[in-house]
Image (cartoon, helix red, strand yellow):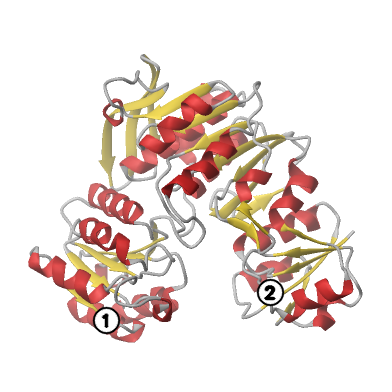
C-alpha cells in the first residue's frame, strides 16, 4: 500500500514513516523546512519526500494520506486531498490499525516523564529477551532510534494526550488499545487544546477506561488527579511513588523507593514491592522524578513478564533520551545541558535533579517560554518559583508573542525582576544572539548551564557551545 504523510518531518510522523517502511509499505511525504536529523533519517530509510506542500505531491494518487496534527485547513496539499476525495486518516489511527491491533500494547501516558519512561520500559523488555516493538517521542540512546518494528507481540508506545488531527480533536492516546497502561502523573497542560482542568482529567479517565479487565494500570501517586484514576480503572492497578507522596488515607504504593542517593554518575535506590524489599538498583539518570519514571517502568515490565534480574541489569545499562538532561558539551570547563522541560513542574524537577547531580556547582538556568502553556500568564508564578532553584537565570522572549496581550501572556521581564528581588541574578534578553552574548560574558569555569525549551530555541545550543569555547 502507498502511504503519503503530510507533515512527515515531525518526530511522531517521521517515526510512523519508518514503521510503515519497515512493514513493507511504499511511503512518501512532504513538509516545510525539513532539516537534519529528520531529513537524513528519511533519506536513510529510502523514503521520498518533498520540502514544501503542493497538490502535485499527490501524483500518483496514494492509497492513504496521513494528515499530521500540525496540518490545518488551508494547506494546499490537504485541500487537494479533500477536493479529490482521496482516503485520508490520522497518524494515531494508522498506528492502531497497522501496528497495535492484535498486539499486547504497553502505553505510557502522563503529563511529565512519558518519553523517558517509555524508553526505559522498552530497554528493560529488551534486556529481558522480550524484544518489543516501540515508538518513543524522542531518540532512545540504547537503540539509537525512536522506533522499531519487531516480531514480538509486545508494542511499547508513548501515549500523548495532545490532539490527533484537525478532524479528530480527541487525544492520540485514545487510539492506542492499551493492555498495560502507565499514567505517570496528571497536571493541567496543553491549554491550547483543553479548556480547563476538568477536560484535561477527562482525557486520562477515558484512556484508563480502555484497559481490558485482563490488563493492568500502573499509576503514579504524586498527583491527586492521577491517584483518582485508581477508582475508575476497570483493570487491576499498581501504584508507584514514595510513601510521603500519599495522604494518610492511602496505603503504601505497590512499588516504591527508599534510601535514594545521588552522584554525578547517576542514582542508587532500594526498590520495594509493597513492603517487601526487592533489592538495590543503580541507574545513570539523575533526579527524584527519574526514580519515579524507573519505578513505573519496572512495574510495567514486571506486568509484561520480565524477570527481576533482567530489570536490574537493564536499568543499570539504560543510557538516556536525547534532550532529557542531555550533556551536549563541556567547553572551557562549563557543562552545558539540553533539556525538554517547558511546564513549571518539569522546570522545577529538572533544576532539582541538576542540583542533586552537580552538588556544589553554580546552576545557570536558560529558559525559553515556547509551548502554549509556557507562554500563558496564568503560569508565570509557577515559573518564578521553579526558576528560583537556579543560582543564575536567563530568560528568552515568548516564542509567539503576537498571540498574547498584557493580560494573557507571560512577561519574561517581570519574571526576571521578581527573581532579582528574591536575590537571584536574572536577565531577560529578547533575542538568542543577545542571550548567548550575555551568558558568555557571565559564565565561569565549573558552571552547569541548563538550557530548557521544547523546541529548537533558535539554534542556541550550538551557538552557546561555540561562544563558550
Q: Which mark is residue 362?
A: none
Out of 245 and 76, give the one closest to the viewer. 76
Neighbourhood count class around disc 1 (C-alpha, 10 Å): few under 14, some 14–19, many 20 upward: some
Q: CA distance from mark 2 to mark 1?
A: 35 Å
- Farthest residue, direction top: 276
What residue lies at 26% left-to-right and 21% top-to-bottom?
248
User: Would residue 57 be visible to someone looking at this image?
Assistant: yes
Left or right: 187 as drawn, with respect to 26: left
Count of marks overlaid on the render: 2
Residue at mark 2:
73
Neighbourhood count class around disc 2 (C-alpha, 10 Å): few under 14, some 14–19, many 20 upward: few
| In the image, residue 430 above or below residue 276 | below
- From the image, state whether disc 2 or disc 1 is nearer to you: 2
What residue lies at 89% left-to-right and 63% top-to-bottom?
63
| In the image, residue 107 above or below residue 357 | above
| In the image, residue 112 above or below residue 121 | below
Residue 210, image quadrant = top right
What residue lies at 29% left-to-right and 80% top-to-bottom?
435
Residue 50, image quadrant = bottom right
| In the image, residue 209 above or below residue 157 | above
Q: Secondary structure at mark 1?
A: loop
Q: Earlier in the sequence, mark 2 or mark 1?
A: 2
Q: Which mark is residue 429?
A: 1
What residue lies at 43% left-to-right and 66% top-to-bottom?
371
Q: Where's residue 169, x and y in %?
A: 62, 57
Q: Where's residue 83, x and y in %?
A: 84, 75
Image quadrant occupied by the C terminus: bottom left
Amino acid at each position: 500500500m502507498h502511504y503519503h504523510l503530510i507533515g512527515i518531518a515531525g518526530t511522531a510522523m517521521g517515526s510512523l514513516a519508518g514503521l510503515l517502511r519497515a512493514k513493507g509499505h511504499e511511503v512518501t511525504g512532504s513538509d516545510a523546512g525539513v532539516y537534519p536529523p529528520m531529513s537524513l533519517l528519511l533519506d536513510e530509510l529510502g523514503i521520498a519526500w518533498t520540502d514544501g506542500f503542493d497538490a502535485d505531491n499527490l501524483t500518483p494518487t496514494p492509497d492513504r494520506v496521513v494528515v499530521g496534527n500540525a496540518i490545518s485547513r488551508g494547506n494546499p496539499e490537504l485541500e487537494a486531498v479533500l477536493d479529490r476525495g482521496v482516503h485520508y486518516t490520522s497518524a494515531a489511527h494508522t498506528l492502531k490499525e497497522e501496528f497495535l491491533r492484535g498486539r499486547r500494547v504497553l502505553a505510557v501516558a502522563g503529563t511529565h516523564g512519558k518519553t523517558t519512561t517509555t524508553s526505559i520500559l522498552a530497554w528493560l523488555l529488551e534486556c529481558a529477551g522480550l524484544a518489543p516493538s516501540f515508538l518513543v517521542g524522542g531518540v532512545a540512546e540504547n537503540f539509537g532510534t525512536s522506533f522499531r518494528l519487531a516480531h514480538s507481540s509486545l508494542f511499547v508506545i508513548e501515549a500523548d494526550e495532545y490532539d490527533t488531527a484537525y478532524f479528530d480533536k480527541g487525544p492520540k492516546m485514545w487510539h492506542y488499545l492499551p493492555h498495560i497502561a502507565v499514567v505517570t502523573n496528571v497536571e493541567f497542560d496543553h491549554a491550547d487544546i483543553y479548556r480547563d482542568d476538568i477536560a484535561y482529567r477527562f482525557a486520562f479517565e477515558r484512556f484508563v477506561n480502555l484497559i481490558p479487565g485482563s490488563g493492568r494500570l500502573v499509576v503514579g501517586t504524586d498527583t491527586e488527579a492521577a491517584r483518582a484514576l485508581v477508582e475508575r480503572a476497570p483493570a487491576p492497578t499498581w501504584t508507584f511513588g514514595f510513601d510521603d507522596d500519599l495522604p494518610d488515607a492511602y496505603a503504601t504504593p505497590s512499588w516504591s523507593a527508599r534510601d535514594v542517593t545521588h552522584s554525578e554518575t547517576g542514582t542508587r535506590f532500594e526498590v520495594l514491592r509493597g513492603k517487601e524489599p526487592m533489592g538495590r538498583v543503580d541507574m545513570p539518570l539523575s533526579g527524584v522524578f527519574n526514580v519515579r519514571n524507573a519505578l513505573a517502568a519496572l512495574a510495567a515490565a514486571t506486568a509484561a513478564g520480565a524477570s527481576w534480574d533482567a530489570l536490574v541489569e537493564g536499568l543499570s545499562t539504560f543510557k538516556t533520551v536525547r534532550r532529557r538532561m542531555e550533556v551536549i558539551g563541556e567547553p572551557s570547563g562549563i557543562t552545558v545541558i539540553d533539556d525538554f522541560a517547558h511546564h513549571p513542574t518539569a522546570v522545577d524537577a529538572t533544576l532539582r535533579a541538576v542540583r542533586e547531580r552537580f552538588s556544589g556547582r553554580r546552576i545557570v538556568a536558560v529558559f525559553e517560554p515556547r509551548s502554549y502553556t509556557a507562554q500563558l500568564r496564568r503560569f508565570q508564578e509557577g515559573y518564578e518559583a521553579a526558576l528560583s532553584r537556579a543560582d543564575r537565570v536567563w530568560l528568552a522572549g515568548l516564542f509567539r508573542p503576537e498571540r498574547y496581550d498584557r493580560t494573557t501572556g507571560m512577561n519574561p521581564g517581570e519574571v526576571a525582576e521578581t527573581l532579582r528581588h528574591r536575590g537571584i541574578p536574572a536577565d531577560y534578553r529578547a533575542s538568542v544572539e543577545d542571550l548567548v552574548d550575555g551568558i558568555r560574558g557571565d559564565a565561569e569555569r565549573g558552571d552547569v548551564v541548563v538550557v530548557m525549551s521544547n523546541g529548537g530555541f533558535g539554534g542556541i545550543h550550538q551557538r552557546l557551545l561555540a561562544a563558550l569555547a
